[in-house]
Image (cartoon, rainbow, N blue to C red):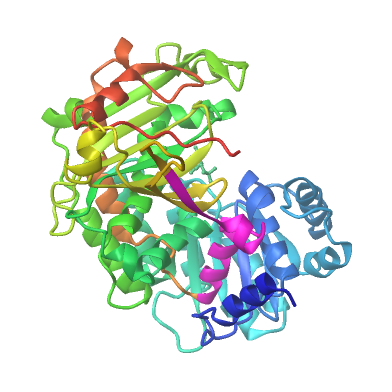
Amino acid sequence: MDAPNQLEQLDELMACRLDDTRKALEPCSIVIFGASGDLTARKLIPALYHLFRERQMPVNFRVIGFARREKSDASFREELRAALDQFSRTKPVDEKVWADFSARIHYCLGEFGDAAAYARLEKLLSSFGSEQLRRNLLCYLATSPSQFGEVAENLERAGLVHKEQQKQFWQRIVVEKPFGHDLASAQALNNELTRHAHERQVFRIDHYLGKETVQNILMFRFSNSIFEQLWTRSSVDHVQITVGEKLGVGGRGGYYEEAGAMRDMVQNHLLQVLSLIAMEPPVSLEAESVRDEKVKLLKSIRPIRSADVAKQVVRGQYFAGLVDGQPRNGYRQETKVKTDSNVETYVALKLFIDNWRWSGVPFYLRTGKSLPLSASEVRVQFRPTPNVLFAAQGGGHLDPNSLTLRLQPNEGITLHFNGKVPGTSLQLRPVRMHFSYDAEFGAYTPEAYERLLLEAMAGDATLFIRRDEVETAWSFVDPIRAAWESRALTNREFYSAGTWGPMAAEELLAQGGHVWHDPRPAK
Ligand code: BG6
């Protein structure tokens, strides 16, 4: 065996397994409400198929699609099979695996408000001939949020979901964003859901938490002493979080007109990434300990008062331009978008976290559509060296050290520091130490939904959003949105499709002597 191979094997031996004590998943039925929609075909069934293929599903399980359109088990399976051909992350679909998997898929026709439909569902579940398949239920609400309450109420009434804790069986309700459109509506939704199910039974999905690299933020921070020691105001100058998307709003104009980037991305995905980057170490790896720390962090973000919105937050909207050399319509020309829409397709903001660790350190967050690249990363920039020795001679040009966590694509972590350019002249330049997931572990990156469905079946809520997290996030973004409501966009808030956002976003950082570091394309 050659030396590198030996080393690899040694590294593998040293892998520290954290889930050895985890119990095997109990048999259960997964009931998808609103199963004729896109989410089932694109995400849920491909995820369940892969879990099954990789022998991660419980020994016994059923998947039931519950929806309004007339279908038989056979026609439902056929549709899903066609979708799988299109959306599966591995191709071709394994015929044998599909045959075994699809035999466990059923369809239940029904309106969400019709008690008789839930009676039919109950009958179907009972027909599986196993108490666990009848009583352990993962109810996935792939419906519009306005139907969450109705479905939860009917599930409870039909005796399918029990709010009080049971010894042997469990029922959980999984919901997707948008979870409300402001604090008041999120509270109303939470009240409706928790009238029929206990908070510990409600699993709110933010698919960013299912991403490998987002999960790795906690492991990276709390299993490496060298970085954690630097993770404070005494070493960190500022932090930049960028979630860029090359796509425009495409066919989702109708939804986007109601949402905008603040509701669509900042309230959830960006604040979630921020909370993992900046939270304190939890007292244990239990879901509640981790979520307690995330909420504490969200609560310590200094609110941005209306008077400060213009100073700390930039919104933008793309006009026609070129993305990858191809013409792209402006947002106002997209289908179902008003021709004078003021909805933001871009947000950049500067925030402060008022706690002991981060006092005075600016956090810059930005996200946008029709940007030059689809790339998400967190850049932690460390303080510059004192202005003596090399820094003094370089006239302020010495690059400060930074650490970039690349969340997607080309997942990895890069440390930037300065090195001497070899040769007789005295020259320093930034060099990089790079860890790539792909190079280290191969290209296996399971879809976020695979991990999330697995965790929901296991009853581990760590990767799901708790009620107080959602509500705290809304309390932060609501005043910003309110300040925008009465103001039309000004010229400096527009950006050409295919650029990194409006000029105003550059100016936001320039005030603090900083510049955005744009993610780089893969080499
Ligand atoms: C969704 C938003 O939650 O996240 C979309 O509604 C956005 O507008 C998407 O495109 C981004 O997710 P990802 O996984 O592609 O980064």
User: Left or right: where does residue 162 sit relative to residue 47?
Assistant: left
Which residue is most to the right?
95
Asked if one can make out residue 35 in the rendered structure from this viewpoint, the answer is no
Give the percent coordinates (x, y) of residue 472: 25, 52
Asked if one can make out residue 253 in the rendered structure from this viewpoint, the answer is yes
Quadrant of the rendering where the N terminus is positioned: bottom right
In the image, residue 60 above or below residue 109: below
Give the percent coordinates (x, y) of residue 460: 46, 73
Q: In terms of image quadrants, where is residue 521?
A: top right
User: Left or right: where does residue 445 sit relative to residue 106?
Assistant: left
Give the percent coordinates (x, y) of residue 211: 52, 56
User: Left or right: where does residue 42 sit relative to residue 99?
Assistant: left
Identified at 64% across, 52% down, the residue is: 43
The total number of labels drawn is 0
User: Left or right: where does residue 78 sit relative to residue 61?
Assistant: right
Give the camera-side residue of 492 and 79. 492
In the image, residue 507 above or below residue 214: above
Give the camera-side residue of 289 and 163. 289
Identified at 23% across, 27% down, the residue is: 510
Q: In terms of image quadrants, where is residue 278?
A: bottom left
Give the percent coordinates (x, y) of residue 433: 47, 53
Q: Is residue 52 magenta?
A: no
Identified at 32% across, 10% down, the residue is: 491
Quadrant of the rendering where the C terminus is positioned: top right
Which span of residues is magenta-colored? 431-458
In the image, residue 130 above or below residue 240: below
Q: Is residue 441 magenta?
A: yes
